[in-house]
Every structure is written in structure tokens, then in C-alpha cells.
Image (tube, coloured by chain):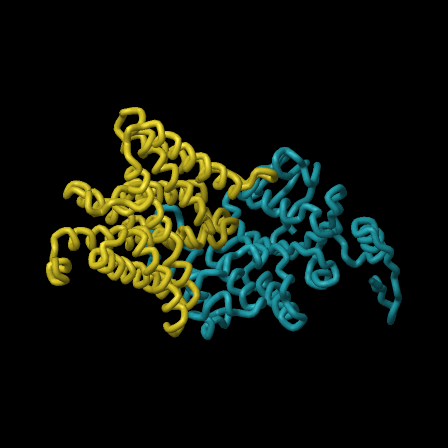
Chain colours: A yellow, B cyan
């Protein structure tokens, strides 16, 4: 297969489409994850979603059903958990992450499924995406973008100044729950195509770099999207040309473009 | 002066552990009152209880009129400044509600008017995090004014202000009280900074809660401040006036 054939193949176009949909949707949500300083909560949610999938396969039930159920449970826990003196949020995150990761490995060792399942849940498998799943990814993208458009101001307010927002009549618990619900939903929807690591990277890396040079909120949003979409584009092309794992390649590009942005883009 | 808020036998705190117990006081219309005490004496807890952020453990907070609205300026460090919010962004947050997605034209006009009235034109699109402490406080007060509060509670507004900004800001609050007809509650641990700007004083050390209605009575202030802050104070006389020497 020569370069032209690679670049015009249906599989590449589908992969690019999935990458663009997932990267833009998750990056928009990542802005609030960075503002709320809850980056590792999203990693724990991603890991638990992966566990839900594996648990479903192990028990012989619908893996997507078990994934949605267990993710919903963990979203409720993180949304309403209040920091306790001796049991802070980061300890809960660490415990849940470690337990779900280890439980996933134990379940996989006791099933007939090959190691590819754990690799797929970690890094996704965009090549195995069916047309129906592509449509589902598109619906998820629309929901995330719509949520961002409707609630971005409220989320900026409650996460930057929670106490005043309560005095002004905003319901922190409700909006926070709604946000985690959409984050959990997007992780579940995009898990098969992009996996845990790439979801987590889209949630944290683009905004973390974009914030360094952003001079206003619209600037922050556009810079985050540029880092994310350009990494998805070049990552997908590179992955196809050199036949290397897609998610890992995009994550490397996210890091490279983030650093380049910080150094060369004028604020 | 008419009371607009009455607090009766109030106990407040966290996780059923009271920080302040059985306190009683009233806030009157159009006054500046100070809540002063050492660090960790429950001043912020009391403010949060009045605002409804935390529930009272016991007692009653009685609003004399049903439509009493609170404004709140939190401690400056409690606002996350990582994100590039402009002054306009910060002000526009005043009109948000859970399911409101766009500002109305009259709300935009109100923001423009307050920017003009309070001399914030040159900061309109400046980054909030790049402003001086005094201007930041002014922006946060203006955000509250957009909601037309009856009682404005400011938590440690004098922190982070140098002497010129401090004087400017406290004078600004004094003018605000006169022009907008609101009651201002000033929380501070620095008695010396707020004493000249308040009309009444609540002193607390976490165990005791003293209400000083007459700030002309220097003897009484000396006794109560000495007791609350556990320090010895003396009174000096100068040109027939009495002062407390710190």
C-alpha cells in the first residue's frame, strides 16, 4: 500500500472522523476538568468504565450495560462526595483507580478473552468501529457540544467561585453532577474507539497547555481545540503510515504540540 | 434604625461541631457593621451560615422582610484565578441561573452602567487576575450590586491591600452605603483597619460573642477587645479625646 492509497483509504477517513469527534467533544469538557482540578477523577472514571466492560464480558452479560451502570454509580459518588478531614477526594480517587485496575487484570486472567481486550480498553481500537458506533460517537459529540454551549458559563462560575455562585442561586451539586454525568457518558461512548488513555489525555493535556498563553476564555477554548484537533490529525496519519498504535501516537503529538504552542505562540 | 435581620440563639459550625454557640444580634438597615476576631474564631463560618451556604446547627436567622437579598464577597484567595476571566466575564456571572443560557439586553445594559458608574471602563476587558487587590475587590462588590442586595457581606476584604488601596476601598464602601442604601457586614481579623469605618462591632473569639453598639465608649471597647484578643491595651488621652493604644 503506497502513501496515496493509505491517505485515501476509507479506514483512515473513518479513523480521522472518530478522532475529530472524540477530541473536540472531550477537549471541551476537559476545560472544566482542568478548572476544577479533577484530572485524576476522570482517570478513575475511565478506569472504572473499563472495569465495567470487562465485568460484563466476564459475567456474560451485555458489557455496555454493565459499563454504563458502574460508570453511573461512580459518577454519583464523585459528584456528591464531600472532602472529609481524614479521607480526602484524592485518596478516594487513588483507591478506586487502583482497585478497578487490579480487578480488571484479575477478571481478564480468569476469562478466555485474550490480552487484546485489556489493550483495547486502554488504547481503543478505531479500526473495529462499525458504522452504527460511528453514528453513536457523532450523537455523543453533539450532546457534549450542546452541553458545553448551554452550561459553560454556569460551570465557569461554580468551579472558579463555588461559594458566591451558591449565594447567587446556582445549584452547585446539580450542575456538578450534570457535568460528571456528561463526562462519564462521553468516556463510555468513546471507550471502544479511543480507549482510556486517550480520553484522559484529551481531558487534561490540551487545556493545560492552552491556559498558559490564553488571554481570554474564547482564546482558551480555541487554543485547546487547535492543540487537540491538530494532534488527532497528525497522530492518525502518522499511525497509519508507520503502522503504530493510534492512541499512543496522538498522545505523543498532544505533548509535542502543547510544548510547541507554549514556546512559539504569542499570547 | 430598623432591623432587617435578627439572629436568635444561633449555633453554627461543621459536622455537628459548633464553632459559635447561642449568639444573638441584629443587622440594621443601612449600617456598616464589623465582625472582628482572631484567626479561626468562626467569623467566616458565621458569614456562611447567614448566607445559607451552611445550615445552622441551632437557632434562627429571621429576615424581617421576605425579600431580603444577600451579596457576598469571599476572601480574595478563594476565587480561582487560573482561568483568563475578564472583568466583564466576572460581572456577567451575576445574572446566571441554573437554566439561563443568555444575558438579556437590559442585563447587559446594567453591566455597562455599573462599569461606567464605578469607573471600571479601562478594566472592562482586562484580565481579572492581573488587577490590583483594590480593583479586584471593587469588581466583586460591583458584581454583587448588579443583584441589588440589601445586605452585603465582605469576608476579609482588607487582606492583600496596601495602605492606599485599603483606604480607597473602605471609603468606597462608605460611599456605597450612603448611595445604595445597603447594610454592609465587614469581616476582618484586623480591628485597627476597620474600626474607623464601622458603626457597630461584633467581637468573637469562638467562645464569646460580644456586640458593641456604641463605639464612642472607649473603656468598654478596651475591656472587650483585651478579653477577646487576650492582649493588654491601654487608653491614652490626646486633645480631650481618648484613644486605645495598641
Q: In this view, does A254 lie to the left or right of B214?
A: left
Image coords of residue A204 (percent x, y)? 40, 54
Identified at 36% across, 32% down, the residue is: A70
Can residue A69 be seen in this snapshot? Answer: no
Q: Is the C terminus of chain B in the top left, top right, bottom left or bottom right quadrant? A: bottom right
Name the foreground residue: A170 vs B23.
Answer: A170
Image coords of residue A226 (percent x, y)? 30, 63
Identified at 28% across, 28% down, the residue is: A112
Image coords of residue A220 (percent x, y)? 37, 63
Name the foreground residue: A110 vs A176.
Answer: A110
Image coords of residue A47 (percent x, y)? 38, 40
Number of callouts: 0
- The relative height of residue B174 versus residue A249 in the rendered view (above or below) is below
Identified at 83% across, 49% down, the residue is: B227
Can residue B38 be seen in this snapshot? Answer: yes
Identified at 40% across, 45% down, the residue is: A42
Q: Quadrant of residue A260?
A: bottom left
Q: In this view, does B64 lie to the left or right of A224?
A: right
Amino acid at each position: 500500500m503506497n502513501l496515496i492509497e493509505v491517505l485515501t483509504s476509507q479506514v483512515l477517513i473513518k479513523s480521522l472522523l472518530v478522532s475529530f469527534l472524540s477530541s473536540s467533544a472531550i477537549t471541551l469538557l476537559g476545560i472544566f476538568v482542568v478548572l476544577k482540578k479533577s484530572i485524576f477523577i476522570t482517570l478513575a472514571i475511565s478506569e472504572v468504565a473499563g472495569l465495567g466492560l470487562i465485568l460484563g464480558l466476564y459475567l456474560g452479560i451485555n458489557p455496555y450495560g454493565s459499563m454504563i451502570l458502574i460508570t453511573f454509580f461512580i459518577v454519583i459518588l464523585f459528584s456528591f462526595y464531600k472532602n472529609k478531614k481524614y479521607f480526602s477526594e484524592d485518596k478516594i480517587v487513588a483507591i478506586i483507580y487502583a482497585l478497578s485496575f487490579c480487578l480488571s487484570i484479575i477478571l481478564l486472567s480468569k476469562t478466555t478473552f485474550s490480552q487484546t481486550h485489556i489493550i483495547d480498553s486502554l488504547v481503543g481500537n478505531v479500526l473495529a468501529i462499525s458504522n452504527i458506533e460511528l453514528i453513536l460517537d457523532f450523537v455523543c459529540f453533539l450532546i457534549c457540544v450542546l452541553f458545553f454551549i448551554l452550561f459553560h458559563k454556569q460551570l465557569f462560575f461554580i468551579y472558579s467561585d463555588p461559594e458566591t455562585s451558591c449565594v447567587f442561586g446556582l445549584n452547585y451539586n446539580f450542575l456538578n453532577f450534570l457535568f460528571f454525568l456528561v463526562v462519564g457518558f462521553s468516556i463510555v461512548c468513546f471507550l471502544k474507539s479511543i480507549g482510556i488513555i486517550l480520553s484522559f489525555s484529551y481531558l487534561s493535556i490540551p487545556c493545560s497547555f492552552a491556559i498558559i498563553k490564553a488571554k481570554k476564555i474564547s482564546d482558551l477554548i480555541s487554543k485547546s481545540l487547535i492543540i487537540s484537533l491538530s494532534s488527532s490529525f497528525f497522530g492518525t496519519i502518522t499511525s497509519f503510515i508507520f503502522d503504530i498504535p493510534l492512541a499512543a501516537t496522538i498522545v505523543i503529538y498532544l505533548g509535542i504540540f502543547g510544548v510547541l504552542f507554549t514556546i512559539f505562540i504569542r499570547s | 434604625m430598623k432591623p432587617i435581620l435578627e439572629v436568635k440563639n444561633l449555633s453554627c459550625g461543621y459536622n455537628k461541631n459548633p464553632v459559635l454557640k447561642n449568639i444573638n444580634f441584629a443587622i440594621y438597615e443601612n449600617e456598616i457593621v464589623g465582625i472582628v476576631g482572631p484567626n479561626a474564631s468562626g467569623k467566616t463560618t458565621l458569614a456562611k451560615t447567614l448566607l445559607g451556604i451552611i445550615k445552622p446547627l441551632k437557632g434562627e436567622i429571621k429576615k424581617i422582610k421576605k425579600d431580603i437579598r444577600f451579596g457576598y464577597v469571599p476572601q480574595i484567595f478563594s476565587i480561582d484565578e487560573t482561568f483568563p476571566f475578564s472583568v466583564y466575564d466576572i460581572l456577567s456571572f451575576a445574572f446566571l441561573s441554573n437554566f439561563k443560557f443568555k444575558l438579556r439586553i437590559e442585563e447587559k445594559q446594567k453591566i455597562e452602567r455599573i462599569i461606567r458608574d464605578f469607573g471600571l471602563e479601562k478594566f472592562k476587558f482586562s484580565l481579572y487576575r492581573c488587577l490590583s487587590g483594590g480593583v479586584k475587590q471593587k469588581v466583586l462588590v460591583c458584581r454583587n450590586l448588579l443583584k441589588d442586595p440589601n445586605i452585603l457581606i465582605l469576608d476579609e476584604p482588607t487582606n492583600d491591600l496596601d495602605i492606599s488601596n485599603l483606604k480607597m476601598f473602605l471609603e468606597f464602601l462608605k460611599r456605597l452605603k450612603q448611595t445604595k442604601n445597603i447594610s454592609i457586614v465587614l469581616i476582618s481579623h484586623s480591628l485597627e483597619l476597620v474600626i474607623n469605618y464601622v458603626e457597630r462591632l461584633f467581637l468573637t473569639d469562638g467562645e464569646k460573642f460580644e456586640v458593641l453598639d456604641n463605639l464612642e465608649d472607649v473603656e468598654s471597647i478596651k475591656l472587650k477587645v483585651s478579653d477577646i484578643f487576650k492582649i493588654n491595651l491601654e487608653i491614652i488621652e490626646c486633645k480631650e479625646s481618648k484613644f486605645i493604644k495598641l
